[in-house]
Image: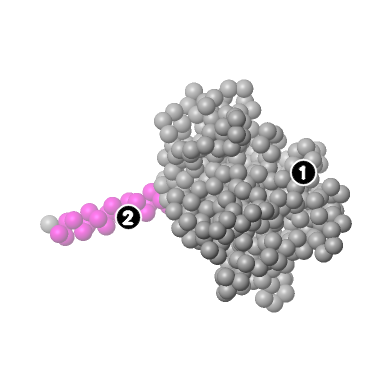
Amino acid sequence: MNVERRRSGILATQLRSACAVLAIAMNLPSIRAEVRVPEGFQSEVLADASVLKEPMDVAFAPDGAAWVTGRAGDVWRVDVRARTTHRVGGVETDVSGDRGLHGIAFHPDFPQVPQVFLSYHQKDAPEGKYRSRVARWTVAGKGSAAALEAGSEKVVVEWEGEKAGQHVGGALLVHPRERLLYVTTGENNQNANLQKYCNDPENRAQSVGDLRGKVLRVALDGSVPRDNPHVGQAGAQPLVYTRGHRQAWSLSFDPVVGILVGENGGDLADDFDEVNRVKPGANFGWPRVFGDGLATSSRTNRVEGFDSPWFAYKRNTGASCTGALIYRDATGGAGFPSRFAGGLFYADFARKSVRFAPVNAGSGKPGESEPFLQSTSGGPVAIGLGPDGALYVLTHGGATKASGDDGLVRVSAKH
């Protein structure tokens, strides 16, 4: 009987392996990339791990196609209607630590001006350093023929950091009204002396003379916008727009709320992950304070003079905010039910979830959140709102390597 059981187990394992191989060969969605959604919604895997490797960010072109970056340097175009994916090109990038290709954004006049911006780390950085680069590429061809044009790269902005540190940022947003580029940078901390690090008023995230731990505001050609808050200030980097960020992972724009940055907070249970509204000259306090002005070193004393989070949640209820956006249905009714209009969706990679919080019309701030999506295995590394009114979720199962849980999932309302 035991022999028969073993034979049955072997046959079952062989059958599962055969099915997995067949799914990859036929480019079928991986079961591991599926997610759980509330009643009245449906999810669909548009591109799975056989196509996307270590996905990092997603942006939508005017034709509705989703462009996805991969940490190892790949860029893919996912045709949402045809359910097809092709690689449009890539960059040579350093993938040590948490580095690699991250953000992507389109020129505001794309495809009439066929340019796309990418944020990645160069391979030829000096010894012991990393070099972050944001560059503009020309896109040749359209639709399924789109490709990054060889030799078309134009550097927009670069900065260096310590390779031994962590948190590198790299999110991108082209503001549709200002026609300017916003870039996040991580604070590149090494926790060798945490007390000194937290109390130092000239820490790299606090110093306006350092590009790390910031949101930068840059013209599309790399020049400095004249109305940036620190232009003309002695010792300041004029590209700095906001400061006091730890690991600002995502950027999104809403015509009412403005620019939102989703960022990872500290590593202690009482730390907070945050969603912040970007405004000129804002200082969100890291590493001197966390949450709503609590001193990072004492954990109890309040320190005045810093901007409070727009929305925050404790690390013991979530540990890695990787996306935040306001839901607006541009389809005229084919999107989500009306109760979601103007509300906040935010993703947490460690908790493998996306949650929803209505935004109070009076206070202009989010209220209590509720679960919306739970990933069965991989966590969400990015979320995006498609022009079709659907929510798109990039899932990733590995921290610094490809995973069978990598994929792009579309969540839509049943009608």
Distance from disc 2 to disc 1, alpha carbons, whole Å, reads 49 Å
Which residue occupies the foreground of this view, 141 or 206?
206
The answer to whether residue 308 is seen in the rendering is yes
Closer-to-camera residue (387/87): 387
> Magenta residues, as a range?
2-22
Quadrant containing the N terminus is bottom left
* Location of residue 206 with respect to 390 vertically, above or below: below
Horizontal and vertical percent for residue 410? 53, 38
Residue at screen point 72% across, 45% down: 279
Residue type at numbered disc 2: Gln
- The residue located at (84%, 47%) in the rendering is 227
Q: Which residue is mark 1?
A: 107
Of the pair 392 and 242, the residue shown nearer to us? 242
Q: Using the image, tell me which numbered label, if any, was put on residue 14.
A: 2
Q: Which mark is residue 152?
A: none
Q: How is the image coloured?
A: one colour
Q: Residue furthest left?
A: 1
Q: Residue at x 56, y 52 (%)?
A: 291
Mark 2: give few (<14), some (14-19) or many (20+) Cα within 10 Å.
Answer: few
Residue 125 lies in quadrant:
bottom right
Closer to the camera in the image, 358 or 23: 358
User: What element does badge 1 sit on?
Assistant: loop
Corner quadrant of residue 260:
top right
Q: Position of residue 90 (x, y in %)?
A: 68, 56
333 sits left or right of 20 in the view = right
